[in-house]
Amino acid sequence: MSLHRPKPALPSDDTRWKLVNATMRRNGYADHALIETLHSIQNAFGYLDETALRFVAAALDVPLSKVFGVATFYHLFRLKPKGRHTCVVCTGTACYIKGAGVLVDALRAHHQVEPGETTADGALSVLTARCVGACGLAPAAVVDGEVVGKLAPEALLARLDRLDAAPAPPGLPASSRPRAPA
Amino acid sequence: MHLDDLAEQAATIRARDAETAHEIRVCMAASCQSSGSGQVLDALRAGVEPQSSSCRVKGVGCMGLCSAGPLVAVAAPGDTLNASRLYRDVTPADAPAILDNLGKPDPIERLHCPTDQPFFTAQHRIVLEHSGQIDPDSLDDAIAVGGYSALVHALTELTPGEVIREITTSGLRGRGGGGYPTGLKWSTVAKMPGPQKYIVCNADEGDPGAFMDRAVLESDPHRVIEGMAIAAYAVGASKGYVYVRAEYPLAVERLTNAIRKAKRAGFLGSQIADTQFSFEIELRLGAGAFVCGEETALMASIQGLRGQPRPRPPYPAEAGLWGCPTLINNVETFANIAPIVREGGAWFAALGTEGSKGTKVFALAGTIVNTGLIEVPMGTRLAHIIEVIGGGIPGGGRVKAVQTGGPSGGCIPRAHLDTPVDYDSLKGLGTIMGSGGMIVMDERSSMVDVARYFMEFCMTESCGKCVPCRTGTQQMHALLERIAAAEAGRAELALLEELCEVVQATSLCGLGQTAPNPVLSTLRYFRDEYESRLVD
C-alpha cells in the first residue's frame, strides 16, 4: 500500500464527506476498500456522482476507470439521484409466482415509469429487487424502506397515493446534495 | 477461559432468567417485522412493569411460520419453541389480552397457533435450534444455551487435527449448494503452508426465494461466529470475512453487533480463551450482484474489484484472498459446526441418508399454506415436506411442480414428489439441492414462463466475462420469449436445446454452467407445454 501521494482535499465542506473519509481511513486507504467507500458515499448522499467517483479514485489511488467499472458493475450503486419516494417491487421467484409482474405493470400504467427510472416530476423512483427475502409475504414491495406484503395492485397504488399527500421522508435538503457533475 | 468457567457463567444467566415466571418472545426477524411485529413488541413492553419479576418481553429471531406473522410465543424461560404457547397474526391491540392471559390454563383461542401441528413437530432443528428462542442481540442469551462452549472446548481440549476429524466423521457437506465435503475442504486448507490464511463466510444468499441464511444471521448470529472461529482454529487462519448481501440490513446490523460483543467478551480477538489462538472477523457488504455467490467472484468483490469469476484451479483453498489459502463456507455450514464439535461427528452422521448427513434448512414459498422456514433431516420425502409440514396447496389444489436450487436448479414434477430430499436424489431428477429455496407451484403456473423467468434472471446477472454465458443466456432468453409468445417453431426449440448444451459445457463458472438447468428440467418433464406453443 502506498501513501506517497498526498490525499486529495474533500470535495466540499459538507460534513458527510468526513464520514466517507472515515471509512477510507479505517481501511488504511487501501484499494480493496473501494466498495466499502462507495457504500458509504451512497448512504450519505443517496447516489454516486462524478465528483464523488473522482474523489474516491484520487483518495484510494485507483484509476477512475476502475472506480467507474465497479460502480456500474454492482446493481445497488446508483449514479442518478433517487426520487422523493421509492418503491422497490420484489421480483423474486415467490413474488413472481404470486403476481409481481402485475404490480410492475400497474406502476407502469399509472405512473408512466419503467423499473429503474424516476417519474418526470421526481416524485417516485420505481425499482425492482431480485428478492427482498419476504417470500412469506409474496408479492411484496418495499415502499420508502418499509416492506409491504400480500399486495394487490390497487393496494400498492393507493399506498403510493397516500405518500404523495404526506411529506417526503427525512432526506437531504437540495442544497446539500453533492455538486452536479461539471 | 476454562470450559467450566463458561458453563458456570451460562448457569448463572439461566438462574437469573428463571427468576421471571413468563417470557414473552416476539419474532423480530425481517418477515415478522414487515408485518408489524415491532409495534407488537412496543405494545407488550408498554404493558409490563420495567423490572417486573413475573414477566419479561423480548425480541427473538425467526420462529419459522412466516406466513402467520407477527408471531408471539409465551414461554417459561429456557423453554423451546415447541414447548411454548404460540400466537399468530398478533396486532398491538392484542397486547393487553396476551398479558392478561399469562398463567391461565387455556390460551387465547382466536390467536392460538398450536405448536403440536406437524409444521412444528415434524421438524428436526439443529441449525435453528435456538432460533426464535434467544434474543439475537444478547450475548448472555447465546451463552445461556451453550453458545461458544464448542469453541472453548475445541481450543482447550482438541488439536486442530482432531477438530477436522470430527467434521470429516460427521459427513457434513457444503450447504451453499455445491455439497462439497466440508471436512475435506478444511483439511486441504489446513495442509497448505503459509503464515496467512483466511476464512470467508459466504452470506451472499442470492437465489430468489431463499432466505435461510438471512434467518440464521438474524436469529442466532453468534452461532455463525462460533463456527467461523472453530474453522479458523482448525485450518490455522487468523482473519475472517463475512460477505453479506447489502439487501439484508437487519442481518448486517445484528451480525455487526454480535461481532462487537463477542470481541468484547474475548471470543474474538487475540488470545481467545487464554490460548495462543487469535481470530478477527470483518464484515464486507455485497452490492447486489448474484454472481458474487460464486467463490472466486466473491473473493474479487472482497478485494474491492468487480465480482467476476476466474478459472479454477487454483482453488481458493490453495490461492484465495490476496493469493493466500482461503476457506470458504456458507452460513448454514458454519452454523452446523458448533453442534458437531459439541456432540461429536458420529452423532451428526447418524442423521440423514447415506450420502447426505444431518439436516437441511429450507425456505418454503410459493403456492403453499405454510410459507416459512423449516429444518428437516436429509432424506425427508418431498411429499412429506409439502403436504404435511407445508400444509399443501391453499384451497386443496394440486401441486404441479416444486422448484429447488433457484436459477441453477430445476422443477420436480408431481410424479416425483416421493423422492427423498438429499444431494444425490435431487441431482438424479435434474435439479440440485441448492442453498435451500423450495418454491411450490400449482396447476396455474406455466412452466415455459418459469423457465423464461429464470433465464431472464441469469441473463441480467451474467457478469459478462465469458462469451457462452453472456451471449448464450441472451439468445436462450430471446428464444424462450418467442416460444412463450407462440411465435416459434420446432427449429427454434431444437436450437434452444442445442444452446443449452453449449452454454452448460463451455461457460466459465457455475452461473453459466447451470443457467440452462431450469429449461432442461422443464423440457424433461413438461415438454408438452413447450410443444403446445409451437406454431408449425
Image (cartoon, coloured by chain):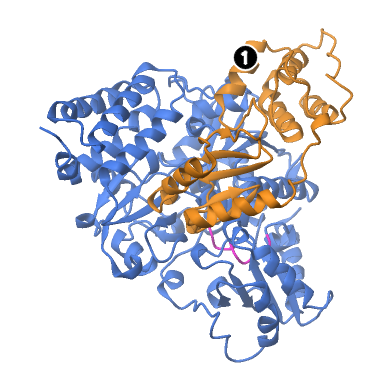
Q: Nearer the viewer, residue B519 or B474?
A: B474
B509 lies left or right of A85: left
Amino acid identity at mark 1? Lys
Q: Is residue B167 magenta?
A: no
Other-residue count near label 1 (Cα within 10 Å), few / some / many at <14 / 14–19 / ≥20: some
B216 lies left or right of A103: right
The orange-coloured chain is labelled: A
The blue-coloured chain is labelled: B
Q: Nearer the viewer, residue B337 or A23?
A: A23
Where B60 sits versus A48, above or below?
A: below
Q: Quadrant of residue B484?
A: top left
Can you give x and y, in whole percent of width and height, for residue B276 in the image?
Answer: 73, 39
Residue at 35% from the left image edge and 67% from the top image edge: B394
* Residue B108 appears in view: yes
Can you give x and y, in whole percent of width and height, for residue B188 in the image?
Answer: 48, 31
Residue at 86% from the left image edge and 21% from the top image edge: A12
**Segment tinted magenta in the rendering:** B127-135
Pinpoint the chain carrying mark 1. Answer: A
Residue pointed to by mark 1: A66
Q: Quadrant of residue A124?
A: top right
Q: Nearer the viewer, residue A143 or B29?
A: A143
Residue sticking out furthest to the bottom: B105
Specify the principal SS of the magenta part: loop
